Image (cartoon, rainbow, N blue to C red):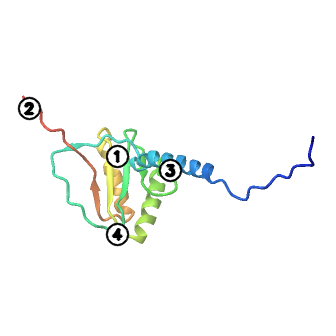
Amino acid sequence: MEKGPRKRRLIGEINVVPLIDVMLVLLVIFMATAPLLTQGVNVDLPKVNASPLPPQRRPDPPLVLSIDRQARMFVNIGRSPDNALDEEALAQVVTAALKSAPEREVLIKADTRVDYGRVLAAMVLLQKSGASRIGFLTAPADPPARP
């Protein structure tokens, strides 16, 4: 025999398991891509036999100008640090960045195959834009092979 219509009880709880699953997946994705964001432009740095400078505490992180093997210039600030800048745009970005912190270091990260004249022109452009502390990034030299 059939009884009257059956009443269904509503569940008053929110199921948070799918939300936690999505959050964990996003966390893993961000953890995997975070190191790629700081690497920036792929540049083959010159190798030198010198000891690294001791770390210094600066209030502002250094501004890094990267010059790749095609002599394209990139700066590690702005909305899109992976887009190449022409000289005029580079001068504007550097001038704006140095207005708030005039003593901010500017480091040049140039590929070994870039023409010296191009690196020198970039240095002059940085100086005209207000940079007073300019340095170069290098890679440590390979240890000598033992016979």
In the image shown, does 23 or 1 lie closer to the viewer? 1
Q: Is residue 83 visible?
A: no
Q: What residue is at 40 percent from the left and 39 percent from the top?
A: 70
The secondary structure type at the circle numbered 3 is helix
Name the residue carrying label 4: 59
From the viewer's perspective, is the residue at label 4 or at label 3 nearer? 3
Name the residue carrying label 2: 146
In the image shown, does 113 or 10 lie closer to the viewer? 10
Mark 2 Cα-neighbour bin, 10 Å: few <14, some 14–19, many ≥20: few
Q: What residue is at 39 percent from the left and 63 percent from the top?
A: 129
**Gap between marks 2 and 1, in whole Å?**
37 Å
The secondary structure type at the circle numbered 1 is helix
**Gap between marks 1 and 3, in whole Å?**
41 Å
> CB atoms at circles 4 and 1 under 8 Å apart?
no
Mark 3 Cα-neighbour bin, 10 Å: few <14, some 14–19, many ≥20: few
Of label 2 and label 1, which has the lower sequence position? 1
Q: What residue is at 12 percent from the left and 36 percent from the top?
A: 144
Name the residue carrying label 3: 27
**Gap between marks 4 and 3, in whole Å?**
29 Å
Q: Is residue 112 above or below residue 51?
A: above
Horizontal placement of 127 versus 146: left or right?
right
Name the residue carrying label 1: 118
**Gap between marks 4 and 1, in whole Å?**
30 Å
Of label 1 and label 3, which has the lower sequence position? 3
Of label 2 and label 4, which has the lower sequence position? 4
Q: Is residue 126 above or below residue 70?
A: below
**Gap between marks 2 and 3, in whole Å?**
45 Å
- Amino acid type assigned to the residue bearing label 2 in the image: Arg
Coordinates of residue 71 in the picture (x, y in percent): 39, 42
Of label 2 and label 3, which has the lower sequence position? 3
> CB atoms at circles 2 and 1 under 8 Å apart?
no
Q: Is residue 52 above or below residue 71?
A: below
